[in-house]
Amino acid sequence: MIKLSEVFKNILLIIPSDNSFINQNSKSIIFIILITIKPMQEKMFTFNYYKYPIVPVKFCFKERETPYIDALLDSGGDFIVIPMPIAHYLGLKLKKAGDVDTAGGIASLYKADLNMSMGGKNDCVEYKSIQIHVSGRNDIPVLIGRHPIFEDYEIIFRKKKNQLILRSAIGNPFS
């Protein structure tokens, strides 16, 4: 999440004292707002990409947390999905979300909120109180769908270099 105080260095509202910005036909006043954008650092993660695009993630709920888990970056999925054993380990409070038809058959889905870290011990990004889905099936990997990762990062697959690169889209919020 980008705080406005981190993006905007200062905001200056200019109102001329001679009323030269008043439109005589409509009697409306035109204001000019100058915004100076403070330069932002780009956040970038590079992960090994051998057979599948894998991203290390850690889940936290209250006092419990998982170790870092290899999660599959799933461009065909809409959201984050974890298997039921991880939900039980964390002690998540699950709400029924419905049933979905998957390649492996029909699966029950539940919803919960938790915290997720992506990256590693030394360099990570944290998502606080993010909604995830829990599969009633135990035979699936952790899946990282398009929300929120594909919204926050440009995803670059460099298969020949065995790299998966996530480059943040922070900076000019008007671009």
Image: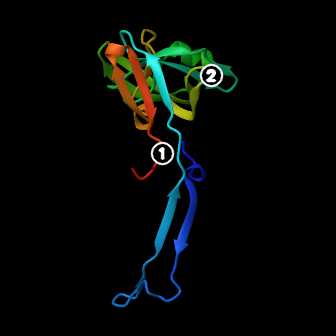
Q: Which of pointers 2 and 1 lies earlier in the amino acid sequence?
A: 2
Q: Please provide percent x and percent y for residue 155.
A: 38, 29
Q: Is residue 44 visible?
A: yes
Residue at the image position 53 percent from the left and 39 percent from the top: 41
161 or 96, nearer to the observer = 161
Q: Amino acid at mark 1?
A: Gly
Q: Position of residue 69 (x, y in %)?
A: 53, 14
Q: Could you say where residue 95 lies in the image, as x and y percent from the top left? A: 51, 29
Residue in the foreground of this view, choosing between 102 and 141: 141
Would you identify the image quadrant in which residue 161 lies?
top left
Quarter of image, res 97: top left
Disc 1 marks which residue? 171
Q: Element at badge 1?
A: loop
Find disc 2 in the rendering and name its residue: 122
- Whether residue 145 sits left or right of residue 4 in the image: it is left
How far apart are labels 2 and 1 at the CA level? 23 Å
Q: Residue at x 55, y 19 (%)?
A: 87
Q: Measuring from the top left, give residue 21's x and y in whole percent.
A: 43, 83
* Residue closer to the observer: 164 or 108: 164
> Of helix, strand and loop, which one carries label 2?
loop
**Disc 1 residue crowd, few under 14, some 14–19, many 20+, Cα 10 Å:** some
What is the quadrant of the N terminus in the image? Answer: top right
Amino acid type assigned to the residue bearing label 2 in the image: Asn
